[in-house]
Amino acid sequence: MKLAFSISGQRHAGSAVRVARQAEEAGYDTVWVTEDYCERGAFALAGAIAAATERVRVGIGVVNPWTRHPALIAMELAALEEISEGRAVLGLGASNPRWMTDRLGIPFEKPIGRLTEAVDVVRAFLTGEEVRFDGEHFQIAAGLAFTPPRTRPPIVLGVKGPRAVAMAAGRADGLLLSILSSPPYVASVRERVGPAMELAAYVALSVDPDVSLARDRVRPMVATYLGVHGEHEITRTAGLAAELCAAFREGWLAGSPRVDLVDDDLVDLFTVAGTSGDAARSLSRLAEAGLDVAVVRDDPGGDVEELLRLTRRLVPA
């Protein structure tokens, strides 16, 4: 299993560049730059990271074709390819109505169709040729003014539903799975996409000699994201009852995540928490289920150097 590090958009941009260099020195495969609203812009930060590193892949994880037109995405990616000398990875996702419509006022319709067309348009632009595209969501007659170093840099899709996973299986170079992707869910996705596609997933990591303390640190996050997911393939595949999913969802929507419902079994199922030995075994279960890359989430308030060293010990190079 390879390791990647996801830099928080809440981290100061200058600090993010330093952390990316530390991740490279620690032997990480990829540094992912998030673009949660309304945090630091992913492409500006990724460009600075690419200029300050030499080996590590620089991933955009993820942007969407609602706030960024596919032509703009292709322009940004092509420039990042030049800066990084061919180390860029594009992550695309469909976003969600809560942000697009409720918060930003953008109509959110047919997300899978829009994401599908966006992948095709970005790929066409990166060939350096003129693009003639007449789709349901995008109508384009344009092309890049230059040809990037690679005409087919990897595109990874951040999707989680069955229809979106099926679409990604035929179009993407990899999948970036959601936080709380359990071994059963990873195994289910792996079965559908085949052995060749790279599967990465965000992992919730909490390690401490005191098992109870390690678990307690992740319970609020588990409650929050089980509320975000609700009754979904991610939770159903993991074996959660519909009533429990509904309770988590209601708590999250009310602004009071149901931390009281997160027992030790749920922590062990959805996170990498416990002693170093517990965490190593949890990562091994994910690898056995078919996960290729564990994406460690940044904690801007914690000791990032210790986090990088710790995870490197759990997954030796």
Image (cartoon, rainbow, N blue to C red):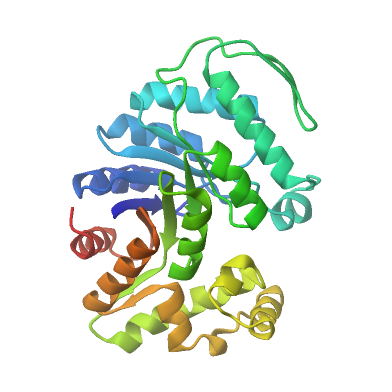
Judging depth in this view, the residue of 105 and 115 nearest the camera is 115
* Residue 272 visible in the shown view: yes
Q: Quadrant of the N terminus?
A: bottom left
Residue 203 is situated, as x and y percent measured from the top left of the image, at 41, 63
Task: Please tell me in which quadrant of the rendered image residue 248 appears.
Answer: bottom right
Judging depth in this view, the residue of 240 and 42 nearest the camera is 240
Residue 28 is situated, as x and y percent measured from the top left of the image, at 26, 48
Q: Residue at x 40, y 18 (%)?
A: 149
Residue 220 is situated, as x and y percent measured from the top left of the image, at 50, 78
Judging depth in this view, the residue of 40 and 257 nearest the camera is 257
Q: Residue at x 41, y 44 (%)?
A: 196
Q: Residue at x 53, y 13 (%)?
A: 128
Left or right, residue 87 beside residue 151: left
Task: Please tell me in which quadrant of the rendered image residue 75 appears.
Answer: top right
Left or right, residue 62 beside residue 255: left
* Residue 66 visible in the shown view: no
Q: Residue at x 70, y 80 (%)?
A: 246
